[in-house]
Amino acid sequence: MTWRAVLILWCVAGLACAAQQTPGTFDSFFASPAADLAREHAPDLYEQARTAWTAAEGAQRHKDGAAADDQRTEARLWLTAAVAEAERVQLDRRRAELQREEERWAKQLARDQQASAVVARDISRYEARAVALDEAERLSALSERPTLNDATLDAILTRVRLNLALAEALGASDEQLQPLRERAEVTARRRPHSAKAAEALLWKTEALIGQMRAQWPEPRPGASIELVETALATGFAADRMGSGVLIRSERFFTSNGNVSNATVKRFHGLLAAFPHGPVACQVAVPELPGRVWAHRVARLVERLRRMDDPGRVSTGMVVTRSLSAGAVQCTFAAYRGL
């Protein structure tokens, strides 16, 4: 049904009272906040009301009271419809604004939750690295004490089994693996308190991994990720950089300036497990030249050369504020971009 038909029905229903309506003026009829909203948000219906009111005024001037009343009634109906339409438009706009606001807050909530997840992962990664560092320090310092407890022995055996599984995946033969497996089983059964025996078993598995990797002419794809993960698990900080994999530690020197046996052993194990290419190390020092730090770095160089390939690692000093004095960072250049 069209607006015109509706208006005709309303007009017929209102004819009885139309004659009793006070004509009023244009200003009194259209000068209201509701009419202003109708003019702004429902201009078509508002113009219909104006047209009907103009026709009513014309009929009034021609002394046609009945026609004037009909036109005024039609004008009121059009204006009522215009006001209702304006209110609907406003409600729709407000609803759309609320929906956009809700979507904005939902996106903000999602960003906050994502940021919280990132922070939680960073905290977990930091805590895991701290645990790994403590465990690595404990395992690497075995030779510095004559005995070990059951918890440390279990940790060593877990590392040994993981290393043997990795060596097998890298192509180690049963002849290479079986003696180490048997030693691990005997160690688990007898629960020896000798730290040196457990340490020797652990380093033999690390050496076997490096032996298998050394058969490749160059590191395989993904080797840089393995290097980073292994370094983190053994207590070093590690990152993949454009120049290679960067390994960092502030524990190469003890608090009294001596070379840390535990850290050097961990680093030797890392070198053995990842045998490709040269490794360039830099020791952060407070100033150059410095006799104290020169002696300390010389002792570190001497310790790092106690390996099968003493020329693989080069060590120098660098003055930098980005690292604390005594911190060492080493670049495994052969693992660049893998």
Image (spheres, helix red, strand yellow):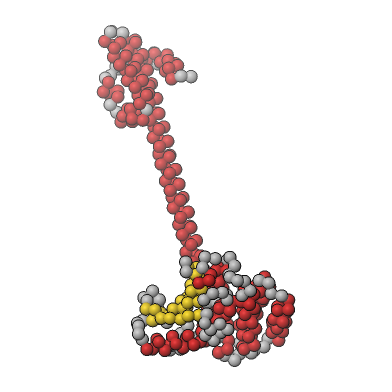
Q: Residue at x 39, y 25 (%)?
A: 81
Instruction: Evaluate whether residue 119 shows in this view.
Output: yes
Left/right of residue 169 with respect to residue 305 in the rendered view: right
Residue 123, percent across and down? 49, 68
At a point 43% along the width and 48% down the height, the residue shown is 104
| Residue at position x 39%, y 13% in the image | 15
x 34%, y 10%: residue: 66
Q: Is residue 254 above or below residue 109?
A: below
Q: Nearer the viewer, residue 122 or 14?
A: 122
Above or below 57: residue 247 = below
Query: Where 90 sits versus 81, above or below?
Result: below
Q: Nearer the viewer, residue 71 or 103?
A: 103
In the rendered image, which quarter is residue 161 located in? bottom right
User: Residue reaching furthest top?
Assistant: 63
Q: Could one spot residue 265 in this view of the protein?
A: no
Asked whether, in this view, residue 333 is left or right of residue 155, the answer is left
In this view, the residue in front, 276 or 240, is 276
Residue 118: image location, x then y, percent: 48, 62
Please, is residue 236 above or below residue 29 in the view?
below
Q: Give residue 197's quadrant in the image.
A: bottom right
Residue 319, image x, y percentages: 37, 78
Horizontal and vertical percent for residue 92?
Answer: 42, 36
The residue closer to the viewer here, 310 or 200, is: 310
